[in-house]
Amino acid sequence: MARYRIRTGRRIGSASLVADDLHARTDGFTSLAVLLGAGGAALGWRAADPVVGLVITLAIAMVLKDAAREVGRRLMDSVDPGLVETARTALRGVEGVRGTGHVRMRWIGHALRAEADIVVDPRLTVVEAHRIAVAAEHALVHAVPRLTAATVHTDHTPVGTDPHAVIEHHRSAPTGSGPRAAAGGP
């Protein structure tokens, strides 16, 4: 049962379900090891109990390490770099996308959420650029497993200009400074 639930947890992206069922599987192996230790002791093997105790300790330590790594990654918003590359590839395949900028993803429960910057023709209307952004979001949701939504920002940057230059000094400011921090913003 634990193996089935581990597979299900991985399929749905639930780090906590996987960790819980790794623990359950270890409990099963631990119970089996206790029976083997008791059998060995009953047959006169004096080292059976300490050996089984060490084996159980190692098993618990390995499960703890794996579970802590998986849950820790999730807590730190870690996403497999392969998923980000899959997203970039999907964006580049959308008609009208001339390039990609930042692509960021994070876990929200069992689902992924993305933010992506795309470059489109500067001569497009806002309506046309929005159509491409929606197509890009649609491509992302289909290409990236467990991605439920994406916010897609379009840049219509003519060559040699940067419309973001006006906010660049905020990006290089230390955390906790600047007008957004003073206003209580993120």
Image: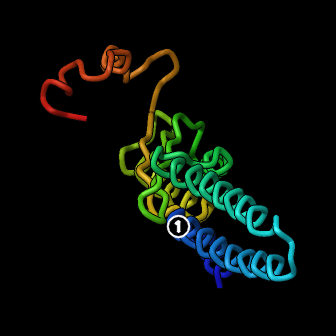
Query: How is colour applied across the structure in the image?
Result: rainbow
Q: Nearer the viewer, residue 173 or 20?
A: 20
Q: Nearer the viewer, residue 98 or 18?
A: 18
Residue 153 on image: x %, y %: 42, 42
Q: Is residue 30 above or below residue 79?
A: below
Residue 171 on image: x %, y %: 36, 21
Categorize mark 1 by other alpha carbons within 10 Å: few (<14), some (14-19), many (20+).
some
Q: Is residue 24 above or below residue 154?
A: below
Residue 93 on image: x %, y %: 66, 51
Where residue 155 sits, quadrant-wise, is top left
Look at label 1 and name its amino acid: Ser
Q: Is residue 54 left or right of residue 181?
A: right
Where residue 27 sits, quadrant-wise, is bottom right
Query: Residue placed at 37% from the left, 23% from the top?
Result: 164
- In this view, the residue farthest toward the left is 183
Residue 127 on image: x %, y %: 37, 51
Q: Is residue 21 left or right of residue 117?
A: right
Query: Residue placed at 67% from the left, 81% from the top?
Result: 4
Where disc 1 sits, the SS reads: loop
To which residue does mark 1 refer? 14
Query: Residue placed at 42% from the left, 63% from the top?
Result: 109
Q: Specify the quadrant that holds the C terminus.
A: top left
